[in-house]
Amino acid sequence: MKKMVSMLSLICLVSILYSSQALAGAPWSEMIPKGMFWIRYYHIQASSSQKFDNQGEKYDLTEAIKEYVESVDMVYGITDNFFVGAVIPYYSGRSYRKQAKSGIGDIEIGGQYRYYKSDRWSSALRLGLRFPTGYVDDPDDTRDISLGSGYTRIRISNLIDYTTPDKTWIFSGKLRLNWQFENEYDSGAKAKAIYAGLGNTYKKNPGEELWAAVGIERRNLFPDDVRLSIKLEGRFHAGDDYSSGSKAFDRAQEKNKSSILYFIQPEIKYSLWKNHKIPMRIYCNYRIPLDGRNTYETSRIEAGLEVFF
């Protein structure tokens, strides 16, 4: 009930904010024409050597964490204002404690509906359902970035774009809720030896996440087929709730589990259509962490291509 009230309250807030109008920079409410496919393949490389503590101060990790991901997004336009799609991530090589891991991550399916469109404004609602298909090492080891989360998530986003009359600038906004479901995990022999009363399993109810971002894209600075964009984003994660036979275990796991992260992310995108008549775009972006609480200070570079047919 608590989760449902939170989700409905946020949807109402989004509707109030955007009812009159409407990944990296902008635009975010871009749609796929009816009957067309859009496939994006991209590679992500992330590196974490520090972490923000509860006061926002950085401290060094005992060993740097590296993450390499290949991912495929597939989208099909049902109408000019509605598309469906899927995200399939594959973790090809990750390093922690000198271990390399690979496999399919959490798969997501969903769609996007554009509910408002004018010459300058565009606004869309995106819904995704993410399944715990990826392998989970230890969901409570804060040093570990696992292939999977171990729980199901519903992602609800409201996206808005504004284009200036001369079509030179696009300003974008995003508000997203990650609604996450409770799951049960094995306690492990080490935890059971430390905490009296801890059974073989415990339940974890992940706190909801709210992401808010603004972005801007500059066109015609170079030839029209090159675009530059940048976004500023804040991510807020509520504290997790634990339920087991040991109150001491629950308190220890819940401590400092709420987190905040702010980052800036520039991007460059190039279309091969105008000069080469190839329905393809290539892009690259770089995420720069600015500040945070109880979260990794992770730099991240992403490069990919998008194909339309």
Image (spheres, rainbow, N blue to C red):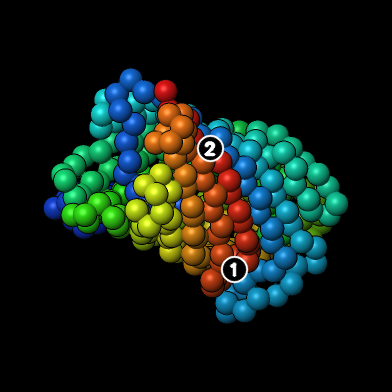
Camera-nearest label, 1 or 2: 2
Mark 2: amino acid:
Leu
- Where does residue 207 sit, x and y in percent of width and height? 49, 56
Task: Count residues near mark 1 (Cα–Cα under 10 Å), then give few for <14, some for 14-19, many for 20+.
Answer: many
Q: Which mark is residue 108?
A: none
Q: Is residue 226 left or right of residue 284?
A: left
Image-based side of 175 in relation to 16, left or right:
right
Residue found at x 43% / y 36%: 275
Q: Is residue 111 left or right of residue 136?
A: left
Q: Position of residue 45 (x, y in %)?
A: 66, 50
Residue at point 59%, 68% (across, down): 294
Q: Which residue is more in the foreground, 270 or 97? A: 270
Residue holding disc 2: 305
| Mark 2, secondary structure of its residue | strand
Quadrant in which residue 37 is drawn: top left
C-alpha distance separating marks 1 and 2:
33 Å
Horizontally, residue 44 falls left or right of residue 127, namely right
Write the residue at 51% across / 65% down: 263
Q: Say which quarter of the image contains residue 162.
A: bottom left
| Residue 129 screen position, x and y as percent | 45, 36
Instruction: Relative to 47, say whether 84 is above or below.
Output: above
The residue at 30%/28% (across/down) is 33
The numbered mark, 1 or 2, whose residue comes first in the sequence reads 1
Question: Quick one: 16 or 239, which is closer to the camera?
Answer: 16
- When asked about the image quadrant of residue 171, the answer is bottom left
Residue 152 visible to the viewer:
no
Q: Which residue is mark 1?
A: 294
Secondary structure, mark 1, is: loop
- The reply to whether callout 1 and callout 2 are in contact (CB within 8 Å) is no
Residue 287 visible, this angle: yes
Q: What is the crowding at mark 2: few (fewer than 14 residues within 10 Å), some, or many (at least 20)? A: some
Give the percent coordinates (x, y) of residue 258: 53, 65
